[in-house]
Structure formats: structure tokens, C-alpha cells
Image: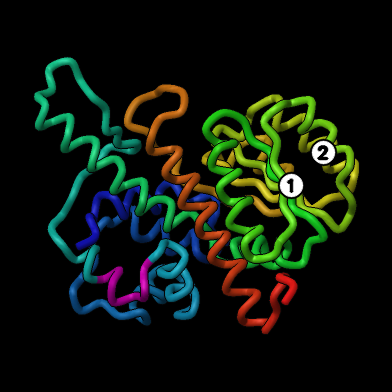
Amino acid sequence: MENKAALIHRIERMKPEFSPSELRVAEYILERQTMEPTASVKDIAAAAGVSEATVTRFCKRIGLKGFSRLREIMSAYAVTIAPNPVVAIEPGDSLDDIIAKTFEVFRTTLEDTRATLAPDRVMAAAKCIAEARRVEFFANGVSNYLARHAAVRLMALGVPCGTHDLHVAQLASARMLQETDVAFMVTHSGENPDILRLTSIAMEQKATIIALTGNRRSRMAKRADIALVTSERDLVQAPEAGPSRLSQLLGLETVVSAVTWYLKACGRSRLQT
């Protein structure tokens, strides 16, 4: 069953992503942190001063199937959580503690990434990729390995893709982009100076910029035509930490799946038969 504390934390983190009416629902829930087992969509809509459709849309935005699931979670026992709960390894932890914390943070990463990947943005990204002349991935470090994997997956669908390890090659590739191309930027921090420089070049070429980042407030997220936000949570503050890479992998896999679905839904294939 979904953890109530994790859901409250997710809603808190997603506040910048909500529309004004959805934000009223979020603030109503966060202020009370509980819900009557008999509450209805109509009750919550009236209390928050929004439409019933807004409440339903809010539930889906935070990754739930519908209002009944929200009510089930929020009507559970009361919970008090810190504004920014952290799962971190402490010197006094036992091996059992470390194992439990590791699994907990990866579980939460799965939930956070599912909630923060907005379906409308994933769909917009899939459409752009499926219809692009070419898709160029730009990333550094482990992010580049994950981007390469996504590029191979997309090429198997017939989408022309490219990715490079050397920065000089990335610069050349960015300068060769065209208006009908997609520049797919992968940076967890959203502040990688090399990737931001490549983004500026891609923008000059009028390519469509898609960004996958764990920081919705980053310069990368603000510059992108389509910003796909993944989980910001990490077990430890360290370069290439596992949870951030898992969230990137999940985000990229979701985009590839959406492109596959889009091509099939449109009855199209980019593979030559």
C-alpha cells in the first residue's frame, strides 16, 4: 500500500508543477494531512473551492488512479513528517539499517519519478522524437551511458539517433542540428556547464530541446522546450549516486515506451520494410 508520508512529501515537492486550481487542492490536503473515509470528490472540490474535474485531474497528476485511491491513503493513520525527509546512512547504522535504507530510497525514487513525469510532457516528447529528422543525445558521465542506451532503443524503432562521448564531437554535432531535429539533454543537476553550452548552440540551430533533469528549478529545465522532471532524491550526496541514475533510466525508458506507443497508435513505422 502507498505510504502516506511518501505521498505527502511527493505532493509538497510537486507544488511548483500544479496549476492554480490543482495547487488549491494540494494546499487543502497538505494543511490537513488526513481525509474522512466517507469523503467524496464533491466534498473535497467544495472545500478547496475547485471543480470536481480538478480534483480528479489532481489525483492523476500525483500518480494515483483516481480519487478513491487518494482517499484510501489519506484516511489512514495520522502521520507527521519533516518538510524534506532524508534517507541517509549514519555512522551508527547497522548493516540491516543500511540495507533497509538503501531499499527504501530506491523504492521512493520509483514513486517520485512516476509522480513527477507529467504524462502530457512525455507525450509531447514522444511526438517530437517520432517525427524528428534526427535525435541527438547530449550527456556526460553515467548519464551519457544511459543516453546511449536510449538512443540504441530508439534506433531499433527506426528513429535516427546519435550520441557522442567526446565534448568536441558533441559541439560539432550540436552545430549540425537542424530545425527539424531534437536535441535531447540528460543532466540530473540541470546545471552542467557543458550541457548548458550545448543547449545554447542547439537553440541557435532552432532544434527542439528536450531535457531530462532531476531539478525543475534548474537553468536546463527553464531553457528546454519540453522539460521531463525525475526524482531529486539520493541516498547520499555523491556524484553518480544510484537513485538519481535509476530515475534517469526510468525517465528514458518511459520516453522510449511512449515513442513505441505513438508510432503504433499512428499506424506508422520508421523502419524500412
Which region is colored magenta?
Answer: 64-71
Q: Residue furthest front?
A: 273
- Would you say the residues marked 2 and 1 are in contact, meaning their CB atoms lie under 8 Å apart? yes
At horizontal 36% and vertical 68% (from top left) the residue drawn is 64
Q: Calculate the distance from the C-alpha at mark 2 to the C-alpha at mark 1.
A: 8 Å
Q: Quadrant of residue 70?
A: bottom left
Location of the N terminus (image quadrant): bottom left
Mark 2 Cα-neighbour bin, 10 Å: few <14, some 14–19, many ≥20:
many
Tag 2: residue type? Answer: Ser
Q: Quadrant of residue 137?
A: top right
Indicate the position of residue 161 as horizontal and vertical percent values.
Answer: 72, 52
Looking at the image, is 84 positioned above or below residue 16?
A: above
Q: Quadrant of residue 140?
A: top right
Q: Is residue 248 visible?
A: yes
Tag 1: residue type? Answer: Glu
Within the magenta stretch, is there residue 181?
Answer: no
At horizontal 56% and vertical 32% (from top left) the residue drawn is 189
Q: Is residue 237 left or right of residue 139?
A: left
Number of marks drawn: 2
Q: Secondary structure at mark 1?
A: strand
Q: Is residue 264 left or right of residue 239?
A: right
Location of the C terminus (image quadrant): bottom right
Q: How is the image coloured?
A: rainbow
Nearer to me, 267 or 47: 267
Indicate the position of residue 232 as horizontal and vertical percent values.
Answer: 45, 39
Indicate the position of residue 147 as horizontal and vertical percent values.
Answer: 59, 44
Residue wearing tag 2: 173
Q: Is residue 155 left or right of residue 96?
A: right
Residue wearing tag 1: 136
Mark 1 Cα-neighbour bin, 10 Å: few <14, some 14–19, many ≥20:
many
Within the magenta stretch, is there residue 68?
Answer: yes
Q: Main secondary structure of the magenta part?
A: helix
